[in-house]
Amino acid sequence: MGKNMRVVVIGTGYWGKNLIRNFFELGALTGVCDQDTDLARSRVAEFSKVSVFENAEAVAEDPAIDAVAIATPAVTHGALTRQFLEAGKNVFVEKPLCLEPIEAEALGGLADSRGLTLMVGHLLLYHPAFQALREVIEQGDLGHLRYIYSNRASLGKVRTEESALWSFAPHDVSMILALAGRLPKIVIATGAHYLTDGVADTTLSHLSFSDDLQAHIFVSWLHPFKEHRLVVVGSDGMIVFDDVAQGKKKLLHFSHVLSTKNGTPEIHRAEAVPVAFSKTEPLLLECNHFLKCSKSGKRPISDWHEATQVLKVLKACESSILSGASATA
């Protein structure tokens, strides 16, 4: 799909190298750009016909480039996205799109006015296991959703510029909003910083939706083991997406049912049933989706509207952490 698209990856560090590999595999990678040109050259040394650009201006001014994929520090995302949209490039930008919802809406308006694709890297929306989980819910197999929780924790990688909330939680917020289909009414969040003043190492966010749906998100980079787990509980069953688990244990459907007999709650337990899903790499699917949308003009799953909703929740969580009071998204 990507052979006619010409993409430059902006930022060749920790995550940029993965974008480079996938866009090359899709036949779309034409160049890379990084302030550290030696690093950029090393990233594409094994790939033929891939240029190294010294700065963003050179990329923006090149009429042969159709699109860019931005994987730079979060604080730079908004300005770089605007620069490339104004230059007529389709833009894929890693999460978050920017740091303020009002800026996200302005960038989205700019993209729409230019007829350009603006897509944000909410990777787990493209994970085949999460897509299979959504299908189970949409088919009504869980009944009425009651609560969702997501834990995303590990030992490192510790950041000193952005908190664990902004570094980890966008993935969880995007999944929960996709399942809820709406913004929460009330957000209550707490956080603590132990390593760097003002940068939370752990945060716990509670989201209250209408219709009694509740959700919470725990993120930390000071955790003894890696845990990436999404649990969805409904009136007729439960489903668990454990991204650390291997094989069939990654996505399990439990048909547990809670009922009442003579005024006494009863739990009817069921064996876990694995849910089948494609084994295609999520990032490859995400990158290919961007290429398809850029060529067809179709709106991406993680478009700027979706990204703005995620930002609103993140800002509400941040506000609650700072104020010690509840907030609204």
Image (cartoon, helix red, strand yellow):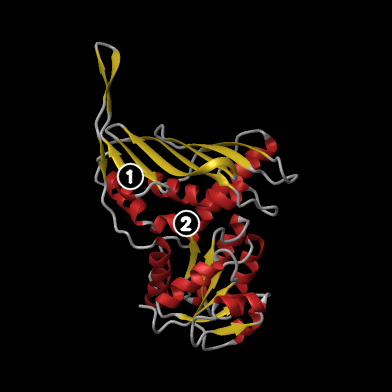
Q: Is residue 112 left or right of residue 140?
A: right
Task: Check the picture and name the quadrant holding the C terminus.
Answer: top right
> Tag 1 or tag 2, which sits nearer the N-term?
1
Q: CA distance from mark 2 to mark 1?
A: 29 Å
Secondary structure of the residue carrying numbered label 2: helix
Q: Position of residue 291 (x, y in %)?
A: 41, 74
Q: Looking at the image, is 184 positioned above or below residue 37?
A: above
Residue at 59 percent of width and 71 percent of height = 12
Residue closest to the eye, 19 or 136: 19
Q: Position of residue 193 (x, y in %)?
A: 69, 41
Q: Amino acid at mark 2?
A: Glu
Circles 2 and 1, Cβ within 8 Å, touching? The answer is no
The label on residue 306 is 2
Residue closest to the eye, 309 or 149: 149
How many numbered callouts?
A: 2
The label on residue 249 is 1
Secondary structure of the residue carrying numbered label 1: helix
Residue closest to the eye, 283 or 307: 283
Residue at 40 percent of width and 61 percent of height = 282
